[in-house]
Image: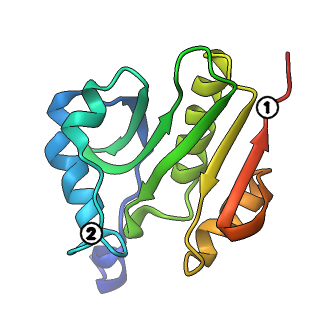
Amino acid sequence: MSMVASMTRLETFARLHEARLGDVHGLWGLSERLPGGVGGEHPIWQTLLQAEDAHVHVATECQLVVGAVVIWHHKGADVARLAWLGVEASTRRRGIGRLLLETGIARADLAGAAVVTAHVPGDAADLQAFLADSGFLSGKGGEFRLPLVAS
């Protein structure tokens, strides 16, 4: 086997599921490895998974957590909030973030939300561009809004 062939990273397809308590360790590891993760703000995963208004979806490859999305939506509310979206650096640019985002948005839409909002820090230019490419409208102070089309 050539050196190039032995160094080639095998790609798999991500699988999505609603997060469960068994995912907490993997979710914590994911949030630690992302920018701002070490010593930064972390979701309290176990609490989120037990919260009625939090919708958490996980992307896995080979049973390893490679991404997650958290959408907050209070039952009957018009507004849902994209609270957290993260994808492992080594698996980016393969559609996992988009799949997670679209799944979270669809969940909010099914639950009756008319708009999804997000607050993005000013230093997160990649995330801002990603949300804009996904149809979110940019507002003041890092606020983004995605009006959901009534079906």
Q: Coloring scheme of the render?
A: rainbow
Q: Residue at x 55, y 45 (%)?
A: 82
Residue 73, how many percent across, how many down?
53, 28
Can you say whether 42 is above or below 48 in the image? below
Q: Secondary structure at mark 2?
A: helix
For the question of whether residue 118 can be seen, the reply is yes
Q: Quadrant of the N terminus?
A: bottom left
Can you say whether 131 is above or below 27 in the image? below
The disc, 2 or 1, on the residue closer to the chain's N-terminal end is 2
| In-image side of 70 versus 41 (left or right) | right
Which of discs 2 and 1 lies nearer the camera? The answer is: 1
Quick one: label 2, few (<14), some, or many (20+) residues within 10 Å? some
Can you say whether 64 is above or below 73 in the image? below
The part of the image, by quadrant, that contains residue 120 is bottom right
Q: Amino acid at mark 2?
A: Arg
Q: Amino acid at mark 1?
A: Leu
| In-image side of 56 versus 72 (left or right) | left
Residue 128, how many percent across, how many down?
66, 68
Q: Which mark is residue 79?
A: none
Q: Which mark is residue 148?
A: 1
The part of the image, by quadrant, that contains residue 148 is top right
Q: Residue at x 56, y 64 (%)?
A: 93
Q: Which mark is residue 33?
A: 2
Q: Residue at x 19, y 58 (%)?
A: 29
Can you say whether 149 is above or below 91 in the image? above
Q: Quadrant of the C terminus?
A: top right
Mark pair 2, 1: CA separation:
32 Å
Q: Residue at x 27, y 69 (%)?
A: 33
| In-image side of 43 versus 101 (left or right) | left
* Total number of numbered discs in the rendering: 2
Residue 3, how many percent across, how many down?
29, 85
Quick one: label 1, few (<14), some, or many (20+) residues within 10 Å? some
